[in-house]
């Protein structure tokens, strides 16, 4: 057991817990109303939204998984950088429209928007279920990030006592989310990102110095991992995989309910536009973080005998924690692990709030209890957020880790299938809601089939066109099918006026 | 109704097209899948993409400024 690291970790975790509970009093609102609890009253300014969206995108799992992918697979893992660059022009152009229409009509979720735009509750149900199902494994992976750093401090993570630290962290998370709503992760995100910036900067400065500079470090990387494998023998190789992973992930990102929640909590559309310009600061950090995968490779952390048991348990996900332990004094390892651990709490809180907003607004009120009062609505969301997190906890404790990773991979494919309804819907409602439902189902089935054909090990599907193989992100291929079906069927269905539903929004609502 | 036509839908919107540039620069991998020219020992593949973080941010700020 690494007592110094554990003490620092516990102290920082304790400080964050206090902040989480205190957050209920910050810009006080009536937390018995859903948009106060679930959107922090739509009162967040540029700086807080910057931290909140940063907390959404750059999570504990990112911190562990991105360097792990670079460590294991090399350059292809770097797609996270172009992905988090091209997402911001999209955020700048598209999301202010979503904010405006949501503000005007008091929409809290993407499902609310679809209801207002298309007036078809079955399409809303499809969007809501996709959002919830895609979010669940994501929350589970945040807990995984936490589990890896707890394991790194020498606390065994096997058996009931091994799970105990995780259960305690979970109870803290659940309690402050319940009492403070979105205000809690908004405030904690500020602490979390400060710690993460400190950790990453320390890593990218100290470790290369020990290795003799960046040039020496890159020289130690096997050439096959340094660049992408180019096109060869009628196969586009990693080129098309890299580009489609970046593009598809960028589109999927703001379909995720937790991103939508952070965006809608802004107090003006200007906040979103400004953030699109400033959020790339995080991308820069993410790129540096990805490079730590190479540092771990250059140091050869997986060959150090003291880390053998953890590598056996967590695989390459242990690369970054091992690098931290190997390089830094114990107290700083405690800071770094707290950064990762708290980095899991923030998105897990936002995700569970987002999922429960979706469930409450678009399933519970829509289908189960249409006449509930605002107070009952908020109460239901709070309880749902507990259930969602509890489900994620059971997932991590009782099911093999591999399932959570595979489900998260599928989640990315699934959530992308709501693009035609949600994103295209912001610009036109020419697409027919019934056509969108069938297109969504077609994309879901096709995407799942592609992932299944790869035994759920990868999301890069080798599409064969006329003897030529184009490996690409299955989410995009499935989306192409989705769009084709939606467009063809819209041509057909739009002939029948009754299928079109009613639109509560007007063109001006998207610009105010 | 009283809005100035060029503000909401006119020529200022043309600046938005600038935001296509990062997509082309980053999604066409053959532009940058090289080791040389390396910068301080960092292969081109890596520093090129880092550079685009800054360039994209600058483009967004520019378009934002022009849109207002």
Image (cartoon, grey):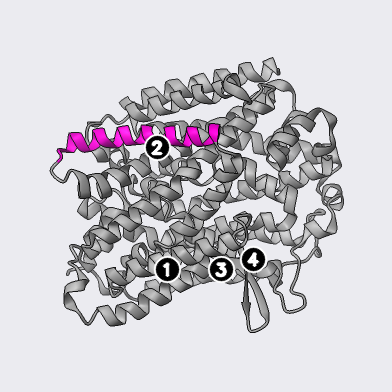
Instruction: Determine if marks 3 and 4 fall on one subunit.
Output: no
Q: Position of residue A274 (x, y in %)?
A: 43, 53
Name the residue beneath numbered marker 3: B23
Q: Chain of mark 3?
A: B
Q: Chain of mark 2?
A: A
Q: Secondary structure at mark 2?
A: helix
Q: Position of residue A187 (x, y in %)?
A: 42, 32
Name the residue beneath numbered marker 2: A388
Asked whether, in this view, residue A15 is left or right of residue A499, the answer is right
Marks 1 and 3 sit apart, C-alpha to C-alpha, by 28 Å
Query: What is the span of residues highlighted in magenta in the rendered image?
Result: A372-398
Marks 3 and 4 sit apart, C-alpha to C-alpha, by 15 Å
Residue A288, visible in the rendered structure: no
Above or below residue B46? Residue A432 is below
Q: Residues within 10 Å of mark 2 (few under 14, many from 20)?
A: many
Q: Dots 1 and 2: beta carbons under 8 Å? A: no
Instruction: Determine if marks 1 and 3 fall on one subunit.
Output: no
Instruction: Determine if marks 2 and 4 fall on one subunit.
Output: yes
Which image quarter is the C terminus of chain B in?
A: bottom left
Q: Secondary structure at mark 3?
A: helix
């Amino acid at each position: 057991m690494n007592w110094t690291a554990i003490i620092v970790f516990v102290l920082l975790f304790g400080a964050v817990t206090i902040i989480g509970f205190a957050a209920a009093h910050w810009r006080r609102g009536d937390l018995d109303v859903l948009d106060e609890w679930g959107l922090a009253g739509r009162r967040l300014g540029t700086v807080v939204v910057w931290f909140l969206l940063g907390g959404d995108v750059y999570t504990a799992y990112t911190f562990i998984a991105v360097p792990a992918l670079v460590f294991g697979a090399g350059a292809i893992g770097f797609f996270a950088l172009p992905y988090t660059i091209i997402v911001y022009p999209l955020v700048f152009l598209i999301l202010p429209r979503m904010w405006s229409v949501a503000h005007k009509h008091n929409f809290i979720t993407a499902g609310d928007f679809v209801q207002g735009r298309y007036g078809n509750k079955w399409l809303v149900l499809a969007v809501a279920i996709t959002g919830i199902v895609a979010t669940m494994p994501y929350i589970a992976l945040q807990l995984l990030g936490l589990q890896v750093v707890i394991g790194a401090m020498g606390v065994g993570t096997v058996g009931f006592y091994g799970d105990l630290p995780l259960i305690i962290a979970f109870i803290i998370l659940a309690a402050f989310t319940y009492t403070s709503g979105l205000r809690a992760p908004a405030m904690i995100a500020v602490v979390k990102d400060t710690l993460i910036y400190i950790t990453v900067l320390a890593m990218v400065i100290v470790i290369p110095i020990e290795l003799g500079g960046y040039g020496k470090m890159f020289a130690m990387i096997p050439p096959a991992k340094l660049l992408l494998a180019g096109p060869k023998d009628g196969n586009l190789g990693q080129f098309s995989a890299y580009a489609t992973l970046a593009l598809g992930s960028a589109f999927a990102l703001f379909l995720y309910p937790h991103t939508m929640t952070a965006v809608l909590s802004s107090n003006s559309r200007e906040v979103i536009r400004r953030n699109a310009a400033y959020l790339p600061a995080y991308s820069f950090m993410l790129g540096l973080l990805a490079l730590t995968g190479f540092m771990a490779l250059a140091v050869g952390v997986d060959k150090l005998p003291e880390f053998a048991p953890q590598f056996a348990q967590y695989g390459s996900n242990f690369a970054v924690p091992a690098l931290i332990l190997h390089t830094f004094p114990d107290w700083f390892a405690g800071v770094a692990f707290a950064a990762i651990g708290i980095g899991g709490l923030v998105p897990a809180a936002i995700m569970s709030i987002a999922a429960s907003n979706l469930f409450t607004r678009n399933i519970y009120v829509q289908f189960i209890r249409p006449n509930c009062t605002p107070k009952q609505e908020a109460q239901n969301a709070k309880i749902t957020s507990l259930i969602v997190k509890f489900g994620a906890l059971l997932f991590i404790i009782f099911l093999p880790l591999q399932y959570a990773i595979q489900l998260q991979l599928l989640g990315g494919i699934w959530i992308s299938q709501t693009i035609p309804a949600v994103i295209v819907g912001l610009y036109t409602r020419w697409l027919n809601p019934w056509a969108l439902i069938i297109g969504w189902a077609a994309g879901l089935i096709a995407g799942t089939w592609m992932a299944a054909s790869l035994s759920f090990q990868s999301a890069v599907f080798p599409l064969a066109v006329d003897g030529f193989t184009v490996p690409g992100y299955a989410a995009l291929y499935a989306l192409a099918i989705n769009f084709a079906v939606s467009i063809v069927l819209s041509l057909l269905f739009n002939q029948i006026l009754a299928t079109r539903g009613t639109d509560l929004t007007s063109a001006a609502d998207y610009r105010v | 109704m009283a809005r100035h036509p060029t503000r909401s839908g006119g020529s200022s919107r043309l600046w938005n097209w600038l935001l296509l540039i990062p997509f082309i620069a980053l999604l066409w991998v053959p532009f940058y899948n090289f080791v040389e020219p390396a910068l301080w020992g960092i292969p081109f593949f890596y520093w090129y993409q880092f550079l685009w973080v800054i360039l994209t941010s600058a483009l967004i700020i520019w378009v934002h400024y022009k849109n207002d």
